[in-house]
Amino acid sequence: MLVVMHTNASQEQIHLVCDAIQKMGLSPHPIPGAQRVAIGITGNKEMVDTNRLTGMAGVLNIIHVTQPYKLTNREMKVDDTIVSIGKAKFGGNNLTVIAGPCAVESEDQYVSIATEVKRYGAMMLRGGAFKPRTSPYSFQGLGEKGLQIMAKARAETGLPIVSEAVDTDTFDVVEEYVDMVQIGARNMQNYSLLRRAGRSKKPVLLKRGMSSTIKEFLLAAEYIMSEGNYQIVLCERGIRTFSDYTRFTLDISSIPELKKLTHLPVIADPSHASGKREMVIPLSRAAIAAGADGLIVEVHTHPEQALSDGAQSLTIPMFERMMEEITAITRTIREHNGKMERGGSQARAQAVCR
């Protein structure tokens, strides 16, 4: 349920409504918007008696949210959420790219890649310090040493960093170093980890599970938001289908669907979806054209020597080309939207004059 406040509602009136909701045994979630504050209500197992709220000062309207995901729902918050991490901004009209190697292998390797991707427009650095791998014999990451290397690259480049917390045991140490905590596809329904991420003060990058529906994806984000952390970026990273040509199938259709259903920003991961270096740029173009707010891609100076996922890692020249192409697509879309808005404004003005 959503309590919509008047545009001129005072902070005291908002506080009193939140207090009344708590006294009903429910949880209030104030959501600032461009025009007014709305207060989401969670914790109810049946219809809430709204009579205690409708007559309170500052209350404009009460809306019943029909979907099981409440806080992530665009019915709850019409305006896009913009997640800001330093100069990187996800959502709104921003195009933000996260780049770096699959795994942090050494200081020289990581700082070199970080310097190059910054040169060509990356706004954040990715890198795995703790690596959940399908095989127990594969490289599992450098652990805290890898996070220390990432922190050094941040100091040298000025770019914020994101890395994955693979369980609640490692969450604290990852949270200590990074600017954004990643919850990977294998952990999308690890509910204790989601709740821990919800108690964090750091933004969260949540990847869609490889066999998860859109509803399950949004409910995973709901777990994080229900604990108080509203700074979430959703990532479509490919799902498992009958096709075995690529590693997974990048669900391009999920991007406009998510943009319609939720106010949270949505990015795509074409590297993990395809598993093939030559497919990353075409899939990146498609994702941006479909409305993605950005990308997270794997880049390596020497992919053939990578300890993890070298086959899907872009070379530096390929990353440069990808950035040029998605920037051109974004510019074209914005110009088209601008013309449509201007045309609509002129039509409305002519109608008024007539």
Image (cartoon, rainbow, N blue to C red):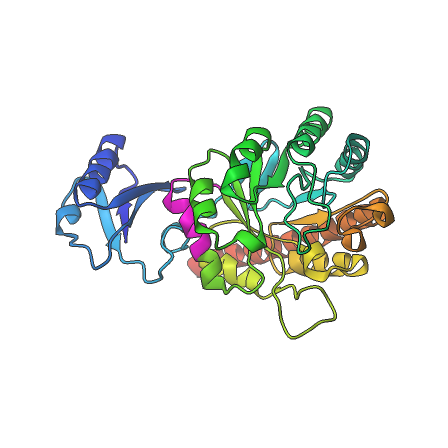
Report the side of 204 relative to 152 (left or right): left
Report the side of 189 relative to 156 (left or right): left
- State the residue at coordinates (76%, 47%): 323
User: Against 12, is 205 above or below?
Assistant: below
- State the residue at coordinates (73%, 66%): 246
Q: Where in the figure is residue 257, as x and y percent of width and height?
A: 52, 63
Q: Magenta region, mostly helix, strand or loop?
A: helix
Q: Can the viewer see residue 350 in this picture?
A: no
Quarter of the view holding residue 115: top right
Residue at the front extreme?
A: 137
In what quadrant of the picture does the C terminus appear? bottom left
Q: Where in the figure is residue 101, as x and y percent of width and height?
A: 74, 43
Q: Can the viewer see residue 123 in this picture?
A: yes
Question: Which sits in the foreground, 340 or 214?
Answer: 214
Q: How many marks?
A: 0
Q: Where in the figure is residue 111, as x and y percent of width and height?
A: 77, 31
Quarter of the view holding residue 64: bottom left
User: Against 259, is 153 above or below?
Assistant: above
In what quadrant of the picture does the N terminus appear? bottom left
Residue 323 is one of the magenta-drawn residues: no
Q: Where in the figure is residue 265, as x and y percent of width and height?
A: 53, 49
Question: Which sits in the foreground, 104 or 118?
Answer: 104
- State the residue at coordinates (62%, 38%): 162
Residue at the bottom extreme?
A: 242
- State the residue at coordinates (36%, 54%): 70
Report the side of 183 relative to 5 (left or right): right
State the extent of the magenta-drawn residues as a range.
219-231
Quarter of the view holding residue 289: bottom right
